[in-house]
Image (spheres, helix red, strand yellow):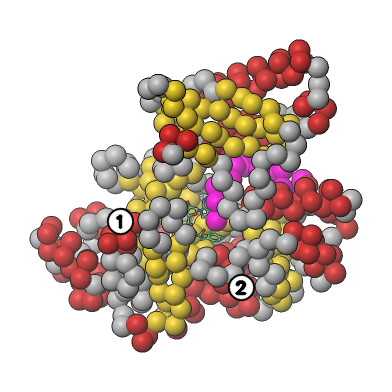
């Protein structure tokens, strides 16, 4: 199969040229936000920085971070860099606490966004011959519209199914011969489960590629989805505050997601000290936008934990790759002082025969002690097995989890289908400490 590249000029640039382009665009962005966004101007003034101080890319680290709190304080339109009359679209991110954050797009921003999404969809193998079924929710969430515009830009046929309605999704997939599926990875598994229940062989479908994003997922989960749906399962990453989907995506090598560096500058920082870390280190991803008009972001702290790889990828793109994120720093659970991510436990569970790929972590506090329970669905034969066998299965799972996360967890085997199935982003952690 021939592997296409949507925008060869920007995806295969020599590093020197990318950096030159980034610097020019950064200077223009900094100038613009200084003039038109009070929050940035105040923050720059506090640090005694003026736009002219940004003379090289390394000066980026002198600029202040932007956090979700800044966006909340300026709710709803305070961070917009253009008057509302130039904004053609408003989205928001579903915060679980407090006010949501509101983001805006100009006409040009929508074009930029569509092109960025077209790039990662092309990298994943989508062409104008594909029939793309969008199973993300249309609405304030950026996922559905982003992928929708990207697929149309490529010239593919788009089915705007929206989220949920699992049996209808499957019927449409069969009848309309969808070749590409767009949803969260956890919903892809929900679909696979339901197909099995309905007695539908996924090999009989026309699906060939999945474009999954919006939540963290492990390599083990990728293998599970690929094996059950007979597709190439690709990852793509983004966040509303920065643009939505379209920040980064897998190429056919699936060895890290290429970040579109002509549109974003990524940095990895130590989340504790805020210090920039050298390439290869694991830390928090910070993103600066270079081409956005309505809602430019300077050094936005994503809270997502990952690392960057600047080595050349076999696909020919020169763009840096980000590793699958381990999760958000706010999903990270600290148990007895040890940092634990749901994705680490997911890797362990997926490798154990008899564990279903459905799990939840329940954090609680007894006295002053934090406790971690891992609820795992198991196959019926294990669930109804004699006590002794079940006990030894449980101990084996506990041991394997402990060897990976370095701290003890209590495992509870739960009945098949007892953990709520996701239609969007899965809820992996239930923290009862904050109730
Ligand atoms: O989830 C944007 C998106 C939609 C990306 C569809 C890809 C596909 P938000 O709702 O603002 O935006 O949530 C952003 O979701 O900070 C990550 O924590 C997480 N996230 C998104 N994509 C991935 C991914 C959209 N591929 C937050 N892997 C981000 C891991 C992801 N986490």
Quarter of the picture containing the C terminus is: top left
- The residue furthest front is 435
- Which residue has dot 2 on it? 148
Is residue 126 part of the magenta span, yes or no? no
Measuring from the top left, give residue 292's x and y in whole percent.
Answer: 38, 73
Furthest residue in direction left, as rendered: 48
Region in magenta: 214-227
Number of numbered labels in the structure image: 2
Q: Quadrant of residue 162?
A: bottom right
Mark pair 2, 1: CA separation: 30 Å
Task: Establish if 10 lies above or below 349.
Answer: below
Residue 298 is at least partly visible in this image: no
Q: Is residue 361 left or right of residue 311?
A: right
In the depicted view, which residue is nearer to us: 25 or 4? 25
In the rendered structure, which disc, 2 or 1, sits on the residue that comes first in sequence? 1
Q: Which mark is residue 69?
A: 1
Tell me the element at label 1.
helix
Residue at image coords 70%, 69%: 161
Disc 2 crowd rating (10 Å Cα; few below 14, some 14-19, many 20+) is many
Q: Residue at x 49, y 32 (%)?
A: 363
Q: Position of residue 358 (x, y in %)?
A: 67, 39
Instruction: Give left or right: position of 198 versus 296.
Output: right
SS class, disc 2: helix
């Amino acid at each position: 199969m021939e592997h296409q590249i949507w925008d060869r000029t920007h995806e295969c640039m020599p590093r020197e040229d990318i950096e030159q382009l980034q610097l020019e665009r950064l200077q223009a962005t900094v100038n613009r936000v200084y003039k038109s966004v009070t929050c940035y101007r105040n923050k720059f003034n506090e640090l005694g920085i003026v736009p002219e101080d940004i003379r090289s890319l390394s000066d980026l680290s002198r600029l202040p971070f932007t956090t979700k709190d800044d966006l909340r304080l300026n709710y709803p339109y305070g961070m917009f860099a253009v008057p509302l009359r130039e904004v053609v679209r408003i989205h928001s991110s579903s915060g679980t606490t407090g006010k949501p954050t509101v983001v805006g797009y100009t006409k040009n921003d929508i074009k930029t966004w569509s092109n960025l999404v077209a790039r990662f969809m092309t990298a994943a193998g989508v062409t104008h011959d594909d029939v793309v079924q969008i199973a993300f929710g249309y609405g304030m969430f950026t996922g559905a519209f982003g992928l929708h515009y990207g697929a149309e830009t490529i010239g593919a046929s788009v089915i705007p199914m929206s989220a949920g309605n699992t049996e209808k999704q499957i019927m449409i997939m069969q009848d309309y011969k969808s070749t590409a599926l767009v949803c969260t990875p956890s919903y892809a598994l929900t679909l696979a489960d339901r197909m099995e229940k309905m007695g539908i062989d996924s090999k009989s479908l026309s699906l060939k590629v999945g474009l999954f994003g919006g939540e963290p997922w492990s390599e083990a989960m990728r293998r599970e989805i690929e094996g059950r749906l007979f597709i190439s399962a690709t990852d793509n990453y983004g966040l509303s505050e920065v643009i939505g989907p379209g920040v980064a995506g897998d190429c056919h090598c699936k060895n890290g997601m290429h970040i579109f560096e002509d549109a974003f500058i990524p940095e990895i920082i130590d989340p504790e000290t805020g210090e920039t870390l050298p390439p290869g280190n694991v830390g928090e991803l910070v993103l600066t936008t270079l081409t956005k008009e309505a809602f430019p972001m300077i050094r936005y702290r994503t809270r997502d934990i990952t690392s960057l790889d600047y080595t050349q990828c076999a696909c020919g793109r020169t763009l840096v790759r980000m590793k699958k994120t381990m999760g958000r720093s706010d999903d990270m659970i600290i148990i007895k002082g040890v940092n634990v991510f749901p994705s680490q436990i997911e890797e362990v569970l997926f490798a154990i025969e008899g564990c279903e790929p459905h799990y939840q972590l329940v954090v609680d506090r007894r006295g002053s002690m934090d406790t971690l329970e891992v609820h795992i669905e198991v196959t019926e034969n294990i669930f109804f097995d004699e006590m002794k066998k079940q006990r030894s299965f449980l101990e084996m799972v506990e041991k394997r989890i402990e060897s990976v996360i370095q701290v003890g967890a209590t495992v509870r085997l739960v009945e098949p289908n007892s953990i709520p199935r996701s239609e969007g982003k899965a809820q992996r952690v239930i923290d009862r400490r904050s109730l």
